[in-house]
């Protein structure tokens, strides 16, 4: 039964280094079918995605799920600047948030939901936690090194626009990071430790336990799944993961100039959740 109203509760969760901002969205009435932890994407993609995350959280709550939206260390309204962010800190943040949900979940399923690099973080986290019933992955980053290089190209593009040419190349930026030097990219100070941790993450080397739903937003649903994603999915299936995958038509709202919605994704996600818990 779809419920008409939800409760939205913002609060700060004590983290290892400081306070972590959270929003808990829950059904106002009736039993909770499951508790979901949402892990946001990287840097500016997080801000571009806030509306879709909020819309989906409300839709999930109306369908009987509780959703905890977490701002990771150095992101959003949580403690620290982006330069303080580290992958291990994010794993610890998400573990604390998951424990907070577990303390309130009773015997209902616990699930992880992530977008882009947040989906990659969710897979990593799922391999470390004792109780995760399933993962919901929106356009997960399959190769951290390629993702990092794409992010660094933002700096090169900015130099081209402001100075007529790039002062460095991706290889030089990576060498500076490997030497321990932080680099500012698009207004975000990227720590060397975080950069190297991202570069080391590959989904073909991590298999989520149990069930996973993989939903990609694409321009044309008739187009085949990207080869890199296909390879990861097949490896997961071969290693025992029960995987459901689908594509929906829409814009890549996490990188569009204006804040964009993808209604088809909202519906596909509800269907994916039903499959995860079937």
Image: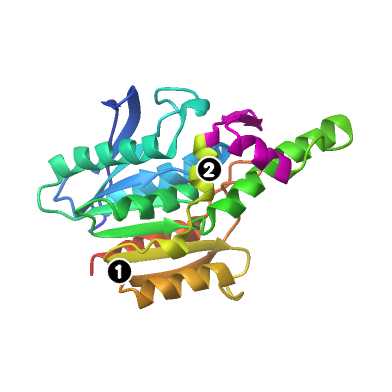
- Secondary element at tag 1: helix
Relative to 243, residue 82 above or below: above
Q: Which numbered disc, 1 or 2, marks the residue that appears first in the sequence?
A: 2
Relative horizontal placement of residue 166, taking residue 205 as reference (left or right): right
The reply to whether residue 69 is in sight is yes
The reply to whether residue 75 is in sight is no
Quickly name the residue at label 1: 275
Which quarter of the figure has residue 184?
Answer: top right
Report if residue 183 lies within the magenta region. yes
- The residue sitting at 35% across, 60% down in the picture is 270
- The residue sitting at 35% across, 39% down in the picture is 69
The stretch of residues the image draws in magenta is 171-192
Kindly identify which numbered label has been placed on residue 69.
Answer: none
User: In which quadrant of the rendered image does the C terminus lie?
Assistant: bottom left
Quickly name the residue at label 2: 196
Relative to 234, residue 82 above or below: above
- The residue sitting at 32% across, 23% down in the picture is 19
């Amino acid at each position: 039964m779809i419920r008409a109203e939800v409760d939205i509760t913002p609060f700060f969760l004590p983290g290892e280094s400081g306070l972590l901002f959270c929003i808990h969205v829950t059904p106002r009435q009736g039993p909770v079918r499951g508790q979901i932890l949402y892990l946001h994407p990287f840097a500016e993609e997080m801000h571009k995605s806030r509306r879709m995350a909020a819309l989906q959280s409300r839709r999930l709550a109306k369908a009987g799920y509780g959703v905890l939206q977490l701002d990771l260390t150095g992101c959003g309204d949580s403690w620290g600047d982006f330069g303080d962010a580290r992958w291990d800190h994010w794993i610890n943040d998400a573990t604390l948030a998951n424990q907070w949900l577990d303390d309130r979940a009773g015997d209902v399923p616990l699930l992880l939901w992530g977008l882009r690099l947040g989906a990659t973080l969710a897979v990593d986290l799922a391999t470390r936690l004792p109780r995760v019933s399933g993962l919901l992955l929106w356009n997960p980053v399959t190769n951290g090194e390629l993702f990092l290089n794409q992010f660094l190209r933002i700096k090169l593009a900015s130099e081209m626009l402001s100075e007529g040419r790039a002062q460095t190349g991706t290889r030089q930026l990576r060498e500076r990071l490997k030497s321990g030097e932080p680099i500012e990219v698009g207004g975000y100070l990227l720590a060397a430790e975080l950069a190297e941790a991202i570069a080391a993450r590959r989904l073909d080397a991590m298999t989520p336990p149990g069930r996973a739903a993989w939903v990609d937003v694409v321009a044309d649903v008739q187009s085949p799944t990207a080869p890199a994603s296909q390879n990861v999915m097949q490896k997961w299936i071969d290693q025992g993961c029960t995987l459901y995958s689908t594509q929906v038509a829409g814009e890549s709202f996490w990188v569009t100039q204006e804040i964009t919605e993808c209604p088809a994704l909202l519906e596909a996600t509800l269907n994916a959740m039903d499959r995860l818990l079937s």
